Image (cartoon, rainbow, N blue to C red):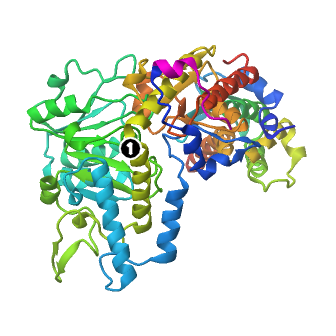
């Protein structure tokens, strides 16, 4: 398989065409807009928390196939998870995408998200794939900060 | 890689047989490179051009044979470095029709040249309530410096709008230049739309209202015959790397009396006459604006680039650009789902062609094209206000130069069909 086919895997193309949880959430516990000034990719991530569990998550925005598919897959993978588990997934995704070429990563932990592993061969696209994850991470951190000060 | 095939359209669009693209390509070593195993089709010339061997040789010759600082040493190689550096100034100044070399200040880039005017001229001359008139198609480098100085001075920014073909709408130009307008800053050629702007007409209206005119020549100078007397502008900012020269060297041309009246931009060595404990006196232009050791090697190699372009002739280079666009526009338009931006008439535009392709994001277009060995740009091209006007987040852009061929346009069109195969539902 060529690098390009590794990048645009069928599952990525499917998430790009039919993004999951692609909607506005009216009263999220927290939300955050991520923006990549280099290419104009824009994503807003909405999170509904119940205690420390992500009861619902959705996103909106515009961007390339990689950013949109990654956001869509993120919502599926963290829905129902505890915030610390989501944080762990964020780290695992980031490690997978920024690893040295050819090195191993935590496939078991990532599940379907391993489909994005091919992005690591395209340095300019790593930010596309991590944009929604950074938005989620910062949204959850902001929430945690709010919670801790109350 | 084959050169441009003789086509029926060559005759109608006036592609000169004397302009030998195959021969020109031999001068550019990088064009023999492959990208992903395919011949490199370099269509990102609006971002930076490739460099002929002669320019690379000039860089190496300086560092190998007479590397020394300028305007200081009394030894032979220092004198040679100074002579070559000043020769470069004279050559670049003559290339754009300056009356004297002292009107040309070397800078790092077009961006730095515009910042120089914004800070040095704007800092001294803009007052509260004054206006600077820009256009909606300006590059961020001809917007942000004006925003910064306008905020400091309480001045206002206005924008000339564009029409449906990405041309400046100038019907009410005389009303948009008000008695408060102190400067009009306009690009000679848009880096996205390719539009060539009627700078002379704008300058006439500006001067009648007592305003100065700064021209952003980053795109225009590499692609068009440019004469600042003919443009009737007051400042021209441009750079070397889009016109076959090295990166890191640019220039500000300004009318001498304007430069002479402006305060310095950066302070330091080279730009001073006498430094006391509490104040200094400055040299005359251009050295007043060249604090610190300048970019000697790149200035010298820029002259080689100017000589190279001059040898080919800017009229034939312009004709080649026009022929490329005349060839490309109808063929791109045939690709189903494509939207082209900018003027329809090749006579009104240069070699930058921006497009969108249905719902396929420009980044994905560029990624697939990269795999085919084709280098284009995707994004907002440092023109976010323009993209807001066009109501798109981003565009893809192919931009041509003197070494590009019709066969490369065909390769682009074929690759776009591959994009559609990969994104059948989006394109």
Relative to A87, say whether B136 is above or below.
above
Please give the name of the residue rendered at 75% of the width and 43% of the height, measured from the top-left corner: B36
Q: Residues within 10 Å of mark 1 (few under 14, many from 20)?
A: many
Q: Position of residue B39 (x, y in %)?
A: 70, 40
Identity of the residue furthest to the right in this view: A108
Tell me which residue sits at (47%, 56%) in the image.
Answer: B247
Residue B300 in view in this figure:
yes
Please state, as top left, top right, bottom left or bottom right, where the C terminus of chain B lies in the image: top right
Q: Is residue A64 magenta?
A: no
B202 over B228 or under it: above or below: above
Spot occupied by residue B362 in the image (x, y as percentages of width and height):
60, 30
How many callouts does the rendering have? Answer: 1
Tell me: B219 left or right of B208. right
Q: Chain of mark 1?
A: B
**Foreground pick, A52 / B105:** B105
Residue at position x 45%, y 28% from top?
B322
Q: Position of residue B180 (x, y in %)?
A: 11, 35
Looking at this view, name the residue that lies furthest to the front: B18
Task: State the quadrant of the N terminus of chain B.
Answer: top right
Res. A63 in view: no
Residue picked out by circle 1: B218
Q: Position of residue A149 (x, y in %)?
A: 55, 50
Residue stretch rendered in magenta on the structure: B1-12
**Which secondary structure, mark 1?**
loop
Q: Which quadrant of the view contains residue B406?
A: top right
């Amino acid at each position: 398989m060529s690098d390009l086919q590794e990048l645009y895997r069928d599952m990525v193309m499917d998430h790009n065409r039919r993004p999951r949880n692609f909607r506005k959430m009216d009263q999220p516990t927290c939300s955050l807009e991520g923006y990549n000034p280099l290419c104009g990719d824009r994503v807003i991530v909405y999170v509904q928390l119940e205690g420390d569990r992500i009861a619902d998550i959705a996103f909106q925005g515009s961007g390339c196939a990689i950013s949109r598919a990654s956001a869509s897959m993120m919502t599926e993978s963290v829905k129902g998870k505890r915030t610390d588990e989501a944080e762990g997934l964020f780290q695992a995704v980031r490690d997978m995408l920024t690893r040295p070429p050819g090195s191993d990563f935590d496939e078991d932990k990532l599940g379907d998200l391993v489909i994005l592993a091919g992005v690591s061969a395209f340095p300019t696209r790593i930010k596309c794939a991590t944009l929604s994850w950074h938005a989620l991470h910062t949204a959850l951190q902001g929430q945690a900060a709010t919670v801790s000060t109350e | 890689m084959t050169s441009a095939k003789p086509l029926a359209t060559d005759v109608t669009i006036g592609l000169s047989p004397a302009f030998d693209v195959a021969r020109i390509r031999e001068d550019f070593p990088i064009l023999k490179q492959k990208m992903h195993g395919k011949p490199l089709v370099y269509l990102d010339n609006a971002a930076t051009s490739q460099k002929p061997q002669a320019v690379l040789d000039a860089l190496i010759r300086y560092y190998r044979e007479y590397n020394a600082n300028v305007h200081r040493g009394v030894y032979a190689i220092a004198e040679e470095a100074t002579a070559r550096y000043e020769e470069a100034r004279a050559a670049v100044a003559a290339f754009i029709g300056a009356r004297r070399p002292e009107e040309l200040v070397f800078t790092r880039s077009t961006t730095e040249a515009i910042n120089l005017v914004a800070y040095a001229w704007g800092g001294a001359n803009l007052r509260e309530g004054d206006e600077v008139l820009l256009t909606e198609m300006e590059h961020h480098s001809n917007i942000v410096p004006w925003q910064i100085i306008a905020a400091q001075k309480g001045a206002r920014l206005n924008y000339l709008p564009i029409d449906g073909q990405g041309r400046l709408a100038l019907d009410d130009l005389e009303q948009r230049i008000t008695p408060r307008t102190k400067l009009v800053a306009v690009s000679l050629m848009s880096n996205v739309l390719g539009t060539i702007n009627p700078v002379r007409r704008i300058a006439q209206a500006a001067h009648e209202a007592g305003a100065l005119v700064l021209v952003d020549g980053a795109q225009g100078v590499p692609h068009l015959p440019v004469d600042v007397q003919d443009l009737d502008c007051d400042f021209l900012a441009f750079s070397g790397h889009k016109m076959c020269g090295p990166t890191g060297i640019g220039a500000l041309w300004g009318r001498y009396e304007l430069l002479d009246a402006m305060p310095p931009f950066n302070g330091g060595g080279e730009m001073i006459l006498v430094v006391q404990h509490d104040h200094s006196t400055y040299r005359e232009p251009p050295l007043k604006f060249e604090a610190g050791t300048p970019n000697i090697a790149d200035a010298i190699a820029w002259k080689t680039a100017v000589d190279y372009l001059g040898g080919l002739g800017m009229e034939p280079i312009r004709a080649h650009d026009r022929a490329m666009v005349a060839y490309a526009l109808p063929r791109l338009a045939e690709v189903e789902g494509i939207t082209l931006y900018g003027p329809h008439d090749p006579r009104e535009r240069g070699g930058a062609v921006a497009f969108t392709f249905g719902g396929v994001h420009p980044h994905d277009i560029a990624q697939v094209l990269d795999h085919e060995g084709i280098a284009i740009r995707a994004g907002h091209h440092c023109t976010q206000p323009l993209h807001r006007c066009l109501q798109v987040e981003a565009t893809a852009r192919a931009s041509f130069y003197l070494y590009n061929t019709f066969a490369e346009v065909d390769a682009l069109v074929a690759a776009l069909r591959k994009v559609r195969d990969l994104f059948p539902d989006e394109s």
